[in-house]
């Protein structure tokens, strides 16, 4: 009886252990026990570890991570050796490698730059070893993470022969985290930064955050919201930032701060923050000095200026370039940079909101200092489920442009809908600007190759919060992962990334991976279909952007109203951005503009983004626009249901906790897809005067029902 009780207790504790292990906390660093046959191969190939000089903190972390990985995957850490012996795992910088006799093709190493790595089977001092080589300790850390990733993916070590280096220099996460712990557009709970307890308390989670990012090659983090508070630059808060910087530094991650442009006024009572005021310029120089004294590798400032109520140089009649250059001048002596946002639009400008950033910034091309990156959102409006690429890409050859993607799903279903964003990112990165002939893709603009820029960058608005699983849902983790992979190499295929993520997060088993990848790859298009098909945009309810609100038309700023974007009435629907309308098309190079000019002969994904068309306009399918719109909405709902069904069939492959959590979210997604479809069709039917065809299921409720729904506590607002 006693033995039976004991067994029960052991079983219970094992169950709770595995439940703990599968709560999503470990992200892509789960290091699950390897299957026997693969473990055998690893054990044969790697029997010991030559750590090298661990007095370097980055090297020490690489070794620590390798030992954590090997212990978890193979049951024990690797014995350490001081020199190469048969079947060692060795980490060598190119300098150290040069001091050995070896058969390594060192030309490969020269191409790797400061952060790249090489993993290969090699002979070092005549001993066959598995080698991680790089030009820096940082490269070795990245190589160690890559080896561990490949082991988790069960790649044959004998065949592992890869070198890789990042194509973009600054690979940054932007946290829209406020100092009170709330997160703007955050759906994963409160901020992971505890500003109150910092710098005294550094939560161990900060280190895990750094590990997860370094594993992807992310090398920068902007800690605070672009809608910033000046107090972030106050000495007390710089000390708090320094404590985080200390944790992240050995992982190769720099901290940046969003800087409030009028900080000299708010912190030190200056009369103005005019960039032409010498005292203001000096204030920023002193501030930079103060920061670098305690954060020697501080990355620099991110600035949202003269946008959505933020102060900026325009308050004094100065240009964005004058504002950015003042900050750049202050950071320059220390190697810091300014990431100046191009997300500007004004309620005082009657111009199409989608044109304003281009109008403002294009004339400033070449006027920014060398340490300024212009940070441009992927599309000209605001992180919609689908937008054509921002016309600034390719239009400012003399200014380095960095991409800003949104990882948090402000407009794509928060944390409750599955929407794998890598296909969205890839669509934009692959978009051809034609500025230097065919193949002048957005990816080539931002990696600097098109215009030979030295400084390059990419930012992703983080979806990270205090939720145990970091991102609010398991599938949201995929978007953080995919962003990191694309930041490292913007030419990577979204399917390949999704496949890796699934294997790292759940299991390698093909019977799971293939259908689960199917869910991921169709998910973003499903969201487009049930929210904003055929090039529609910004139909979300006001403020929190949760759920449909196409009827909203009474807000004081015109461009805050969904009706501004769809322009639906009795005669038709869509935003005319051709010559007869705002002519936003003219902001694109002629090849691109031509491809969107003819509504009868263009990619219909962008149809209503560029054209206002009558309801009975004939689509390429031969159907009317009204019918086609309905069918897209219906298809979106069907896709959500299909995703749900596929997930149900995957139950045998997924642990209870993550299976149920995802299943519950998919139920919400199905219900909300239906809500979106019904509310939008009820509204468009009313404004167009078009009946819902007889063979189509009518919306469940009348329009007033949907209009009356209200969600005062929707998160992230
Ligand atoms: C941080 C949109 C979002 C805002 C966000 C802004 C921006 O308007 O709704 O929450 O503010 O973009 O990117 O600055």
Image (cartoon, grey):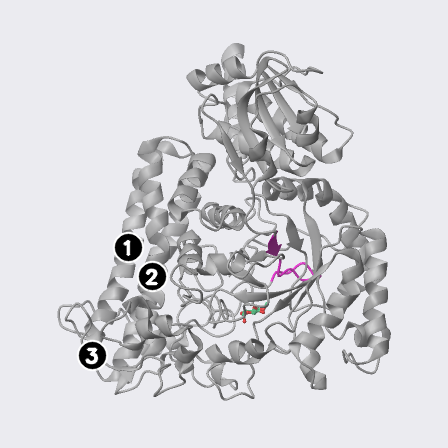
Q: Residue furthest front?
A: 107
Q: Secondary structure at mark 1?
A: helix
Return the residue at label 3: 617
Marks 3 and 2: which is nearer the front? 3
Q: Is residue 132 above or below residue 570?
A: above
Relative to 215, 423 lies left or right:
left
Question: What secondary structure is the stretch in magenta mostly built from?
Answer: loop
How far across and down, in percent of the image, does residue 428 sit?
Answer: 43, 60
Where's ligand 1: which quadrant? bottom right
State the CA–CA distance, disc 3 to disc 2: 26 Å
Q: Disc 1 designates what residue?
A: 639
Dot 2 corresponds to which residue?
Answer: 673
Work out whether residue 51 can be spotted: yes
**67 above or below 281?**
above
Q: Secondary structure at mark 2?
A: helix
Q: Earlier in the sequence, mark 1 or mark 2?
A: 1
Boundaries of the magenta span: 170-183
Mark 1–mark 2 distance (CA, rounded to whole Å): 9 Å
Choose between 623 and 374: the one closer to the eye: 374
What residue sits 59% from the left and 57% below the top?
457
Q: Secondary structure at mark 3?
A: loop
Residues under numbered marks 1 and 2 in contact, where contact means CB atoms less than 8 Å apart: yes
Q: Is residue 225 magenta?
A: no
Q: Residues within 10 Å of mark 2 (few under 14, many from 20)?
A: many
Residue 137, by quadrant, is top right
689 and 106: which is toward the camera: 106
């Amino acid at each position: 009886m006693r033995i039976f009780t004991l067994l029960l207790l052991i079983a219970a504790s094992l169950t709770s252990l595995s439940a703990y292990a599968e709560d999503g906390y470990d992200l892509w660093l789960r290091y699950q026990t390897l299957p026997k046959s693969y473990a055998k191969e690893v054990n044969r190939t790697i029997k010991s570890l030559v750590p090298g000089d661990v007095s370097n903190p980055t090297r020490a972390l690489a070794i620590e991570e390798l030992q954590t990985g090997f212990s978890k995957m193979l049951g024990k850490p690797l014995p350490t050796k001081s020199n190469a012996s048969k079947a060692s795992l060795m980490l060598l910088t190119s300098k150290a490698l040069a001091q050995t006799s070896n058969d390594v093709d060192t030309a490969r190493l020269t191409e790797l730059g400061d952060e790249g790595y090489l993993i290969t089977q090699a002979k070092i001092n005549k001993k066959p070893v598995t080698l991680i080589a790089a030009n820096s300790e940082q490269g070795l850390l990245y190589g160690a993470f890559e080896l561990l990733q490949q082991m988790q993916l069960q790649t044959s070590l004998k065949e592992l022969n890869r070198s890789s280096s990042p194509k973009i220099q600054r690979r940054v996460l932007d946290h829209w985290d406020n100092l009170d712990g709330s997160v703007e557009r955050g759906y994963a709970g409160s901020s992971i930064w505890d500003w109150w307890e910092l710098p005294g308390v550094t939560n161990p989670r900060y280190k895990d955050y750094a590990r997860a990012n370094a594993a992807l090659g992310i090398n920068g983090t902007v800690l605070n919201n672009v809608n910033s508070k000046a107090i972030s630059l106050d000495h007390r808060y710089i000390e708090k930032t320094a404590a985080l910087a200390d944790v992240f530094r050995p992982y190769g991650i720099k901290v940046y701060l969003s800087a409030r442009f009028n900080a000299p006024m708010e912190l030190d009572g200056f009369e103005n923050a005019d960039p032409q005021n010498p005292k203001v310029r000096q204030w920023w120089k002193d501030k930079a000095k103060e920061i670098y004294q305690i954060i020697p590798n501080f990355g620099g400032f991110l600035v949202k200026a003269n946008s959505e109520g933020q102060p900026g140089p325009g308050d004094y009649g100065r240009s964005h370039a004058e504002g950015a250059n003042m900050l750049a001048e202050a950071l320059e002596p220390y190697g810091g940079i300014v990431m100046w946002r191009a997300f500007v639009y004004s309620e005082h400008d009657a111009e199409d909101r989608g044109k304003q950033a281009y109008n403002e910034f294009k004339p400033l091309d070449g006027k920014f200092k060398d340490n300024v990156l212009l940070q441009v959102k992927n599309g000209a409006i605001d992180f919609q489920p689908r937008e054509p690429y921002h016309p600034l890409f390719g239009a400012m050859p003399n200014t380095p442009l960095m991409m800003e993607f949104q990882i948090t799903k402000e407009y794509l279903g928060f944390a409750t809908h599955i929407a794998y964003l890598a296909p969205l990112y890839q669509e934009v990165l692959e978009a051809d600007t034609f500025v230097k002939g065919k193949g002048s893709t957005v990816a080539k603009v931002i990696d600097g190759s098109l215009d030979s820029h030295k400084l390059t960058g990419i930012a992703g608005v983080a979806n990270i919060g205090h939720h145990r699983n970091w991102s609010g849902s398991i599938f949201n983790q995929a978007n953080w992962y995919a962003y990191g992979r694309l930041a490292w190499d913007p030419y990577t295929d979204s399917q390949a990334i999704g496949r890796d993520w699934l294997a790292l997060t759940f299991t390698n088993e093909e019977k799971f991976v293939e259908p689960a990848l199917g869910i991921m790859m169709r998910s973003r298009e499903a969201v487009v279909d049930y929210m904003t098909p055929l090039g529609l945009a910004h139909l979300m309810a006001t403020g929190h952007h949760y759920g449909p609100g196409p009827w909203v038309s009474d807000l004081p700023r015109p461009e805050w109203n969904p009706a501004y974007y769809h322009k639906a009435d009795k005669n038709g629907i869509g935003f005319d951005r051709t010559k007869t309308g705002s002519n936003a098309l003219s902001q694109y190079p002629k090849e691109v503009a031509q491809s969107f000019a003819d509504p009868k002969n263009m990619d219909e994904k962008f149809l209503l983004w560029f054209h206002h068309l009558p309801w009975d306009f004939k689509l390429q399918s031969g159907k009317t626009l009204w019918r086609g719109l309905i069918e897209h909405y219906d298809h979106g709902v069907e896709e959500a249901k299909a995703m749900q069904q596929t997930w149900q069939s995957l139950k045998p492959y997924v642990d209870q906790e993550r299976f149920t959590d995802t299943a519950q979210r998919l139920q919400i997604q199905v219900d909300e897809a239906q809500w979106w479809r019904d509310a939008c069709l009820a509204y468009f039917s009313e404004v167009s005067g078009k009946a819902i065809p007889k063979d189509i299921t009518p919306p469940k409720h009348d329009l007033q029902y949907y209009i009356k729904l209200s969600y005062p506590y929707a998160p992230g607002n």
